[in-house]
Image: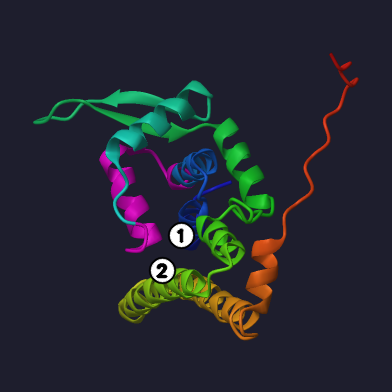
Amino acid sequence: MSRLPVCCLSLCALHCHNARPEGEGIMAIQHAVLALLARGPSYGYELKSEFESAVGPQWGPLNIGHLYQILERLSRDGLVVAHREAQPTKPDRVVYEITEGGRAELDRWLGEPSARSGGFRDDFFLKVTAAARSGDASTVRTVLGNQRAHLLRELRNLDGLRRTAEDPVVGLLLAAACRHVEADLAFIDDAESVLLTDGGSLLARLAAARPAPASRSGPARAAG
């Protein structure tokens, strides 16, 4: 594979942004770094700048220490090689270059579909579950209302960034982020409709319901 266009780099970065679990996020950043190196050899701070430019302002700064850890891991796995480059008036710098194995791994990653990062193991989903099963309508309203206010602020911020984005691919990714937030807002509307419009009877049933205790396996102990 030859040099990747900027749009591919931005899509790699969006995958990183959406990867919530730590392990999956690290793996996604590794592949985004490979995508950057597929454009040509580079060094740490240049990679940091290119990564942040590719993903746009919604990602935030990439920690340089974290980036060097990723580069060390990629080098250890044989996906990149590092060599020192002399500079006339500055200290030598370490330049990284993707290997054929790194290109093959990047091709593999780009060619496979991406599962929803983290599935539905979402902190807010757990809060809604806990609030609903408490049986307290005011708790449900507080949880849903606080989250709605937070998401509306986030949506305004993302939409403002989208409107001023100069890079069309970054604008496209910001639009996708806006739609994710809009979907979460629609879920809150649905939760209110289901949990809070029947006078509290559903919440009362949820609070009263208790799952049957799990049976213990193995032989029963003799009494006495």
Q: In this view, does 183 lie to the left or right of 87?
A: right
Q: Examine the rendered structure and indicate whether residue 201 appears above or below residue 67.
A: below
Q: Give the range drawn in magenta.
A: 35-59
Q: Which mark identifies residue 10? A: 1
Q: Examine the rendered structure and indicate whether residue 43 appears above or below residue 144.
A: above
**Quick one: 117 or 76, which is closer to the camera?**
117
Q: Are marks 1 and 2 in contact (CB under 8 Å)?
A: yes
Measuring from the top left, give residue 6's x and y in whole percent. Answer: 44, 60
Measuring from the top left, give residue 161's x and y in whole percent. Answer: 32, 74
Q: Examine the rendered structure and indicate whether residue 145 appears above or below residue 51.
A: below
Disc 1 crowd rating (10 Å Cα; few below 14, some 14-19, many 20+) is many
Q: Which residue is drawn at 53% across and 24% down?
A: 77
Instruction: Decide whether residue 17 is among the magenta residues.
Output: no
Q: Mark 2 points at which residue?
A: 170
Q: Residue furthest top?
A: 224
Tell which circle, 1 or 2, labels the residue nearer the N-terminal end: 1
Q: Look at label 1 and name its amino acid.
A: Ser
Q: Which residue is drawn at 51% across and 61% down?
A: 124
Instruction: Decide whether residue 52 is among the magenta residues.
Output: yes
Q: Residue at x 41, y 26 (%)?
A: 72
For mark 1, give the secondary structure: helix
The CA distance from mark 1 to mark 2 is: 7 Å
Q: Is residue 171 left or right of residue 78?
A: left
Measuring from the top left, give residue 133's x and y in whole percent. Answer: 61, 62
